[in-house]
């Protein structure tokens, strides 16, 4: 998939839902995920890096939700890294 094709499908870069980040990881686009503290106590956000270098940031969510979502994202990243999925992405 070319850079131009990919950017047509990325509809959110800031304050995205956790499910949106999980979907990007599930489709093989994410290569790294980490958390960052928010201003509110017990709230964090997830940041994922896509294979093209783009950075996607989630909304601030309660820490337990973020931890669960981060586990899901990291499972997808591991599977996709093992299968080198980003090399096989096609749009039909």
Image (spheres, grey):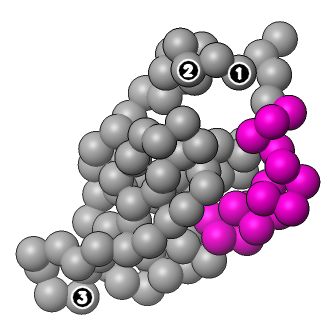
Which residue is label 1 attached to?
A: 1
Q: CA distance from mark 1 to mark 3?
A: 38 Å
Seen in the image, is 83 located left or right of residue 17?
A: right
Residue reaching furthest left?
39
**In which quarter of the view is residue 86 placed?**
top right
Counting from the top left corner in percent of width and height, residue 45 is at 32, 68
Residue to which mark 3 is pinned? 42
Q: What residue is rendered at 34% in x and 39% in y?
A: 13
- Sort mark 1 into few (<14), some (14-19) or many (20+) by Cα contacts within 10 Å: few
Give me the C-alpha separation between circle 2 and circle 3.
Answer: 36 Å
- The majority secondary structure of the magenta stretch comes to helix
Q: Residues within 10 Å of mark 2 (few under 14, many from 20)?
A: few
Nearest the viewer among 69 and 29 is 29
Residue 85 lies within the magenta run: yes
Segment colored magenta: 72-88
Q: Which of the two labelled residues, at mark 2 and mark 3, occupies the earlier sequence position?
A: 2
Secondary structure of the residue carrying tag 1 is loop
SS for dot 2: helix
Give 24 or 83, whichever is nearer the viewer.
83
In front: label 2 or label 3: 2
Q: Residue at x 34, y 53 (%)?
A: 57
Is 77 within the magenta?
A: yes
Q: Quadrant of the N terminus?
A: top right
Indicate the secondary structure of the residue bearing disc 3.
loop
Q: Which residue is mark 2?
A: 3
Left or right placement of residue 55 versus residue 85 in this view: left
Of residues 24 and 41, which is closer to you in this image?
Answer: 24
52 versus 18 height, above or below: above
Give x and y (percent) for residue 31: 61, 55
């Amino acid at each position: 998939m070319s850079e131009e094709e990919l950017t047509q499908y990325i509809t959110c870069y800031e304050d995205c839902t956790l499910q949106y980040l999980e979907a990007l990881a599930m489709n093989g686009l994410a290569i790294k995920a980490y958390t960052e503290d928010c201003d509110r106590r017990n709230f964090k956000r997830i940041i994922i890096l896509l294979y093209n270098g783009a950075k996607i940031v989630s909304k601030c969510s309660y820490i337990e939700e973020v931890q669960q979502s981060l586990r899901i994202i990291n499972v997808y990243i591991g599977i996709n890294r093992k299968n080198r999925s980003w090399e096989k992405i096609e749009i039909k």
